[in-house]
Image: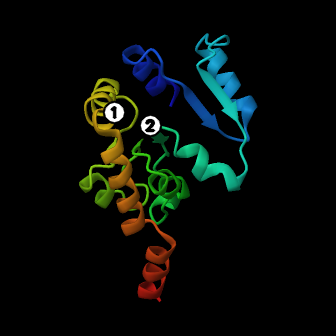
Amino acid sequence: MLDVALALRSRHANLKFQVFSADHDQFKTTIEGKSLTNADWISIERISPHDITKRLSGCDVGLSFRKAMFSTQGVAPIKLGDYLLSGVPVVGSPGIGNTQPLIDAGVFFPSDGRNLGDIVNWVSRSVLADREGFRARCRKAGEDHLSLRDSVARYLSAL
């Protein structure tokens, strides 16, 4: 995630990288490993569940990278729903959950984190160029594919 943020910051000097996590120590170690200890454009915060939507809705793009494993084949990361229902497009790992409809809707950019130039171009030329349009498309995709109503329907179908 940090490499993606650094690549985006190289094109957008005013970028702020907000990390919402309870695990400050692990991320601080990663930042130190990149020699970014005085990077005031990076913040790490723990936020309450009640503030997630409000805080995410102020962001331009979310990052959701997961390691593909046998146990992740049948899951849909909650984070994807949080991002999309807050109007935030996502750059992340494809195939962890049913991401294909989100890719097809244009609100999820599939990446393993190594195609940095492609990520920067998508965020710059697509997302930031039509930020309000993306907010609406993200919310619609989230409602269509990741809402509580959709989850209940899928469970009922499986049962």
Please state if 155 lies on the left or on the right of 138 as rendered.
right
Residues under numbered marks 1 and 2 in contact, where contact means CB atoms less than 8 Å apart? yes
Answer above or below: position of 1 versus 95: above
Residue 42, percent across and down?
61, 23
- Position of residue 63 in the picture relative to residue 32 (left or right): left
How many residues crowd mark 2 within 10 Å: few (<14), some (14–19), many (20+)? Answer: some
Is 106 located above or below residue 18 in the figure?
A: below
Q: Secondary structure at mark 1?
A: helix
| Label 2 element class | loop
Q: Quadrant of residue 93?
A: top left
Rendered location of residue 124, percent (x, y):
31, 28
Horizontally, is 29 left or right of 82 in the view? right
Q: Amino acid at mark 2?
A: Asp
**61 or 65: which is nearer to us?**
61
Coloring applied to the structure: rainbow
Q: Disc 1 to disc 2, how far (Cα)?
A: 7 Å
Q: Amino acid at mark 1?
A: Leu
Give the x, y percent position of residue 41. Answer: 58, 19
Q: Nearer the viewer, residue 5 or 12?
A: 12
What residue lies at 29% left-to-right and 61% top-to-bottom?
A: 101
Q: Which residue is mark 2?
A: 60
Residue labelled with disc 1: 128
Which of the two labelled residues, at mark 1 and mark 2, occupies the earlier sequence position?
Answer: 2
Front position in the image: 10 or 75: 10
